[in-house]
Structure formats: structure tokens, C-alpha cells
Image: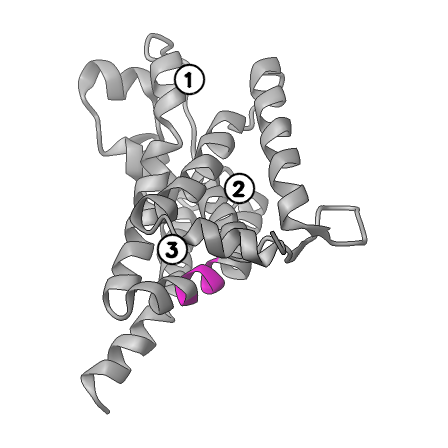
């Protein structure tokens, strides 16, 4: 098997690898093999004690089986498509590397707003890969805006170009309400970053996006 073929195989396995690593760390936290309090994102500790690693490590920890399952299911459904587009646009192995960079940096970028907002709040903490998953979801919408997206309890798919603004509005509204324990700000900024990252690297993707919409 040639080196090129090995690189192509590796590039197609990145999403699976991320899921396996995330699941392993989360399960170890569930059962005491790792201390989730050391890995979670605590804005006060990051800001005042320079625990910068938490900006990444919290994406490996989840609040429960449901949280882990739905995040990894969404990543599995949309991540493989984004992997393929990155491989086509930038080739192997660069496409795979850029995909990893997108996912990993999205974990940190999606938490910046909450870091600044809650930097003096000792009680604020967060876990989960939702911000990075939102980035992957919106990157996939950028490449396939007409794809159908299913929402819980709604039996018909919603086109991506309709789902995207509704999702952003919902996240923005819920973040302002601050009425639950869900990281809506991370979802919002992760989604925005998922659009901007590919466009910053290759602006002509926007032309492809418009062509997908028939514009």
C-alpha cells in the first residue's frame, strides 16, 4: 500500500478517532478513572490561575451518557462529510490536519465569550464538545446548505440554510435568558467559527456555497 493511500485512509478516520478519544476520557471521568474537576472549564481558574489547558480539556469531558452520546452522534453524522471536503480542497495530509485544527481550536474559541463573562465567577464551569460539534455542523452546512437536518420530535428534515439562522437565533436568545445549564454561547460561537474557519482559508468556498443555493 502506498503512502498516499495510507494518508487517505487516515484522513477518513479522524472523526472516528476524535469520537473514540472523547468517549474514552468521558467514560474514565464517569467511573473515577480521571478527575473531571481537573479537566472541566472553570473560567475563574483559567483567568486567574492561568489554567489554559482547560480551554481544550473540557471538550473531552461530558455531563453524562446522554450528553456524550448526542454530541458524538452529531459529530459522526456531520464530521465525516467535512473531512471529505477538506481532503478534496487541501489534499492529504493537509486536509486532515486542517480538520483537526478546526475541531480543536473550536473547543477553545467557543468558550472565549464565557471566559470573559464569567472570569470572576468561581461557581461557573462547563464541560462538553458542543462548541466544536457546532463548528463541524456549520462547516458542513457551508459545503452542503441544502442538506436536511433533523431536530428532535420534528419528523421532517430542515434544509441547512434555514436551520442555520434559526439555530443561531435560538442560541443567542437562550444565552441572553441564561435560564438553564446549557452552554448556548459556546454553541453560538462554535457555529460562527465553523463558518469562518474554512472561508478564511479559502474564500472561494463562499462562491461554491451560493452555487449550491442556485444563486
The residue where tag 3 is placed is 24
Which of the pair 204/8 is nearer the observer?
204
Furthest residue in direction top, as rendered: 120
The secondary element bearing badge 3 is classed as: helix
Q: Which mark is residue 64?
A: 2
Decide: marks 1, 2 in contact (CB < 8 A)?
Answer: no
Which quadrant holds the N terminus?
Answer: bottom left
Q: Is residue 146 left or right of residue 81?
A: right
Q: Label 1 to label 2, Cα distance in Å?
A: 18 Å
Please tell me which residue is depicted at 34% across the width and 67% down the height of the picture: 87
Q: Which mark is residue 124?
A: 1
Q: Is residue 112 left or right of residue 181?
A: left
Circle nearer the N terminus (3, 1): 3
Q: Position of residue 66 (x, y in %)?
A: 59, 46
Image vertical order of residue 10 relative to residue 100, above or below: below
Task: Characterize the magenta stretch by its predominant secondary structure.
Answer: helix
The secondary element bearing badge 2 is classed as: loop
Furthest residue in direction front, as rendered: 215
Quarter of the rendering containing residue 111: top left
Which region shows up in magenta? Answer: 79-84
The secondary element bearing badge 1 is classed as: loop
Q: Label 3 to label 1, Cα distance in Å?
A: 25 Å
Amino acid at each position: 500500500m502506498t503512502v498516499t493511500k495510507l494518508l487517505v485512509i487516515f484522513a477518513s478516520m479522524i472523526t472516528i478517532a476524535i469520537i473514540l478519544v472523547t468517549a474514552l476520557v468521558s467514560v474514565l471521568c464517569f467511573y473515577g478513572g480521571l478527575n473531571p474537576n481537573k479537566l472541566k472549564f472553570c473560567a475563574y481558574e483559567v483567568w486567574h490561575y492561568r489554567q489554559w489547558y482547560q480551554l481544550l480539556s473540557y471538550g473531552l469531558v461530558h455531563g453524562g451518557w446522554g450528553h456524550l452520546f448526542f454530541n458524538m452522534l452529531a459529530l459522526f453524522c456531520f464530521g465525516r462529510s467535512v473531512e471529505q471536503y477538506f481532503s478534496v480542497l487541501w489534499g492529504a495530509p493537509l486536509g486532515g490536519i486542517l480538520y483537526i485544527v478546526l475541531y480543536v481550536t473550536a473547543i477553545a474559541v467557543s468558550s472565549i465569550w464565557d471566559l470573559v463573562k464569567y472570569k470572576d465567577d468561581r461557581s461557573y464551569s462547563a464541560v462538553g464538545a458542543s462548541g466544536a460539534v457546532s463548528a463541524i455542523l456549520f462547516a458542513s452546512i457551508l459545503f452542503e446548505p441544502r442538506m436536511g437536518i433533523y431536530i428532535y420530535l420534528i419528523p421532517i428534515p430542515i434544509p441547512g440554510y434555514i436551520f442555520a439562522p434559526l439555530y443561531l437565533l435560538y442560541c443567542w436568545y437562550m444565552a441572553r435568558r441564561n435560564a438553564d445549564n446549557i452552554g448556548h454561547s459556546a454553541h453560538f460561537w462554535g457555529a460562527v467559527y465553523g463558518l469562518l474557519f474554512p472561508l478564511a482559508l479559502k474564500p472561494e468556498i463562499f462562491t461554491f456555497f451560493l452555487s449550491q443555493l442556485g444563486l
